[in-house]
Image: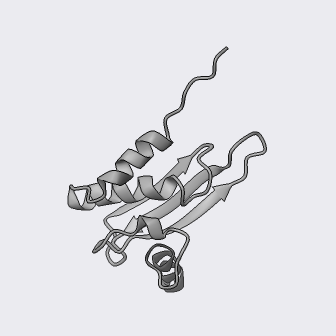
Amino acid sequence: LFDIVVEGMYRAVNGPGGGTALNGAVKGLDICGKTGTAQNPHGDDHSIFIAFAPRNEPKIAIAVYIENGGFGATIAVPIASLMIEKYLTDTITRPWYEEYLRTKTIIYPKKL
């Protein structure tokens, strides 16, 4: 019953032909996921990614929701894929992604 949903979530991350979450793929982990963008009439849209891994016999499921983060693939996918990778392998093979997120997600307080 859910095989087609799992296949769609797998393809969103791992292709072929490109999916909305290709930047979340980690070799050997078979991450499955679905991106989302929630419109925000008061500012930037919210970034969403729901994922699980590995595809067969999942060991982790995660939902990432970043207020004002923009498109799902922009912020939520990298965060989720790093968390999944660290949880399943206890390593990070893409340190540049960590740096990207550090610089992308810093919030400076508004001056009063």
Q: Write the residue at 31% across / 58% down.
A: 94
Q: Nearer the viewer, residue 83 or 57?
A: 83
Residue found at x 21% / y 55%: 90
Q: Is residue 3 left or right of residue 40?
A: left
Instruction: Look at the image and tell me in which quarter the C terminus lies.
Output: top right
Colour scheme of the picture = one colour
Q: Does 82 sit above or below residue 24? A: above
Give coordinates of residue 95: x percent, y percent: 30, 52
Which residue is more in the foreground, 9 or 82?
Answer: 82
Could you say where residue 25 lies in the image, as x and y percent from the top left? 39, 69
Q: Quadrant of residue 71?
A: bottom right
**Quick one: which residue is furthest to the top in this view?**
112
Q: Is residue 70 above or below residue 57?
A: above
Residue 4: image location, x then y, percent: 53, 85
Q: Residue at x 26, y 61 (%)?
A: 88
Most extreme residue toward the left is: 90
The number of numbered badges drawn on the structure is: 0
Residue 36 quadrant: bottom right
Please state which of residues 32 and 101 is positioned toward the viewer in this rendering: 101
Report whether 37 appears left or right of 32: right
The relative height of residue 11 versus residue 48 in the rendered view (above or below) is below
Q: Residue at x 30, y 60 (%)?
A: 85
